[in-house]
Amino acid sequence: MEKRLVIKGMLLKYEGLFGVLDLYKLIDDWTKENGYDKFEKESTEYVKPEGKYIEMRLEPYKKVSDYVQNRIVLLIFMKDVKEADVEIDRKKHKLNKGNLAINFDAYLETDYEHRWEQKPTLFFIRTLVDKYIYKIYTQKFESNLKNDVNSLHTAIKSFLNLYRY
């Protein structure tokens, strides 16, 4: 399988009020709406005196064709997360307060089922086809993947801006 790095290190930082569960739900809903399957690679949570430290690695993926697959890697770091009671429109809401950083990476994976790697001649033919024939389609797939990542980035950014007062 060949992995092409399309987006590397797109960073979103936020400090203030946010809902941790609401953020998870937003990412989950976005992946479902855009045809991605969510895959939680790892999740770690520590409780410290200054607040919780949460680290997650999510890898939503989408099969674009039998040959190409999109993979978005989200590294989510939450630091000093504490519960906070906030009054909005004279109603109390429980939110979280802390630091949030999300790193976005995006990969275009070709031959993810390893069909063309079984024999050296097939591997050679695949390389030629990728380089000269399938290049136009690959550029289109990369453009769509960039649009997806930008859409997710904008959705999370908009969500976090809801909590600014």
Image (tube, rainbow, N blue to C red):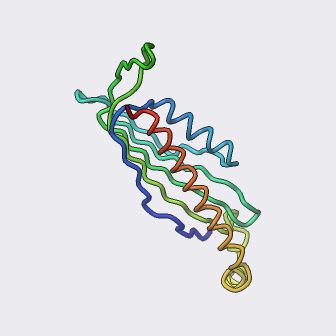
Give the residue drawn at x 35%, y 23%: 83
Expressed as whole percent of the image width and height from the top left, the position of residue 36 reads 66, 48
Expressed as whole percent of the image width and height from the top left, the position of residue 37 reads 65, 46
| Side of 115 where 80 appears, left or right | left
Expressed as whole percent of the image width and height from the top left, the position of residue 86 reads 38, 20
Give the residue drawn at x 54%, y 45%: 155
Give the residue drawn at x 52%, y 68%: 5
| Side of 33 where 53 appears, left or right | left
Image: 140 above or below 45: below
Image: 23 above or below 146: above
| Residue at the outermost right position | 66
Q: Quadrant of the N terminus?
A: bottom right
Q: Nearer the viewer, residue 117 or 151?
A: 151
Image: 126 above or below 81: below
| Side of 79 where 121 appears, left or right | right
| Residue at the outermost left position | 49
Q: Quadrant of the C terminus?
A: top left
Expressed as whole percent of the image width and height from the top left, the position of residue 29 reads 62, 38
Image: 9 above or below 86: below
Numbered circles on residues, count: 0
